[in-house]
Image: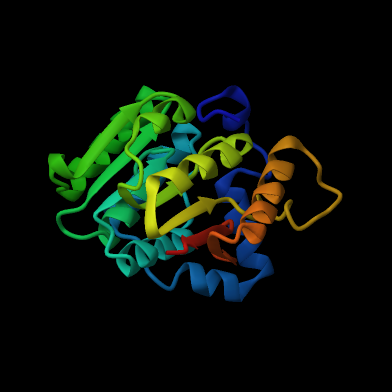
Amino acid sequence: MPLGSPEHRRPSVRDPSFRREAAISANPSWTYAEQFLAEDEVITTARAKGEELGCVPVLPGGGAALRLLAAAVAARSVVEIGTGAGVGSMWLLRGMRPDGVLTTIDVEPEHHRAARETFAAAGVAGNRVRLISGQALEVLPRLSDGAYDMVFCDADKTEYAGYLEQAMRLLRPGGVVAFDNALWHDRVADPAQRDEETTSIRELGKAMREDERLVPALLPCGDGLLAAVVRP
């Protein structure tokens, strides 16, 4: 569903505080892994802002994995789909090269306002972040072919297949594509769950598994991070 839509804001078992409490009580190893790298005040403040706005941020384990992936490919140019309040953005920036530029897309102006506050609090130079407002599938075709080291997707789950198609065009050989919420609150692993979002994520996983251009892995950190390297 689009970020900022009424459904996205509705409290439910998808609420991040509910999910964290449930996970802590059910799986201490998952909790240990999520807390392995502590988030600083900049990110915890951005996380609180994001939850208030209804744009659920990537969880700490997923953020740490994003930083690792960005560092592993020495990312200089990264695209983020779904800025939110800048939690994922900060993890990415901290893994990128010091001269790297993050292009981050969101449909909600209030999300970009919150993200700008996050970047300012972190002392991120203005020339390191390019914020673009609009629908991702309308913005992405305007970006240059093969010009990016990494694409991170954390927006409308029903559009994940479209994001993958665009990412394959945008990424250089050896680049990385990653999708948050790849386990979608434990729904993807349950074959009885057949709602549109769950089905879209499940089909994305199958498509990436079968695509010979990709070397994929499903990482059980955060709410699941589905990542792949584009083969040379």
Most foreground residue, 107 or 74: 74
Relative image position of residue 83 (x, y in whole percent): 38, 38
Left or right of 80 on screen, residue 197:
right
228, above or below 87, in the image:
below
Work out which quarter of the rendered image holds the N terminus and state it. top right
Residue 130 is at least partly visible in this image: yes
58 is higher (above) or lower (below) than 33:
above
Camera-side residue of 148 and 95: 148
What residue sits 81% from the left and 42% below the top?
194
In the rendered image, which quarter is residue 112 located in?
top left
Give percent across and percent down for residue 185: 67, 52
Tag count in the figure?
Answer: 0
Residue appearing at x 71%, y 55% in the figure: 186
Q: Residue at x 49, y 67 (%)?
A: 34
* Percent x, y of residue 49: 39, 38
Give the image quarter of residue 97: bottom left
